[in-house]
Amino acid sequence: MPQTFPQRPPRVPWVRYAPVFFVTFCTYRRRQLLATKKVHDTFVSFCDRAAQNHNIAIGRYVIMPDHIHLFVCGDLQFHLGKWIKSLKQMLGKSISKDVKQNRLWQEGFFDHVLRNDESMAQKWDYIKENPVRAGLVTDSADWSFQGEIVLIDRACL
């Protein structure tokens, strides 16, 4: 009799709390298009509006030349994929005025649900050092394209 193996377990269809996501997305072919004042200003403006108008909290973030890391949390109706698509579209508008290329973004994005404060701190400690590891600055505090839009305190969620 052939042995059968269970399929992968399904994703959790619902949760009773609003999860905090750690998200990374990249430019197409890792083109260095993002670490500019214009992109940074567009990002901050988009995230401020998301917080004020849609109850979406964007916490700490780092904008690297070819990718962005951020922490984000919404309410129980928050759809991460749709929000990332909107963010990419808005950033793309500010980039495409200066760059002649049809495709700006790598398909999709990486997301990870943060389950505790320690996980968030570990992720932040790692990503805030990205500009140093890339040789862009000697001290991560000197990187201009980072910040925090809203304090995300997991203890309050």
Image: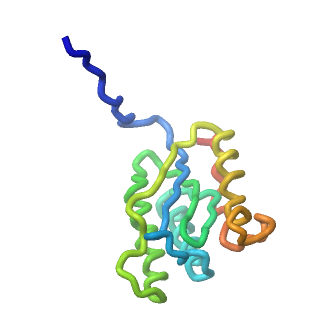
Residue 147 appears at what percent x and percent y? 68, 65
Image check: 142 left or right of 157? right
Residue at 49% across / 61% down in the picture?
25
| 39, above or below 152, in the image | below
The one nearer the camera, 27 or 116, is 27
Q: Quadrant of the N terminus?
A: top left
Residue drawn at x 65%, y 48% is 123
Residue at (71, 72) in percent of width and height? 136
Q: x, y (%) of residue 58?
A: 57, 59
Residue nearest the observer in this picture, 16 or 85: 85
The x, y position of residue 114, in whole percent, is: 57, 42
In this rendered view, identify the residue nearer to me: 43 or 52: 43
78 versus 102 height, above or below:
above
Identify the coloring.
rainbow
**Left or right of 64: which side holds 3?**
left
| Quadrant including the C terminus | top right
Answer above or below: position of 26 versus 122: below
Residue furthest out toward the left:
1
- Residue at the location (55% across, 76% down)? 32
Q: In this picture, is 149 found above or below 100?
A: above
Q: Indicate left or right for 19 with 140 as reference.
A: left
The quarter holding residue 3 reads: top left
Residue furthest out toward the right: 139
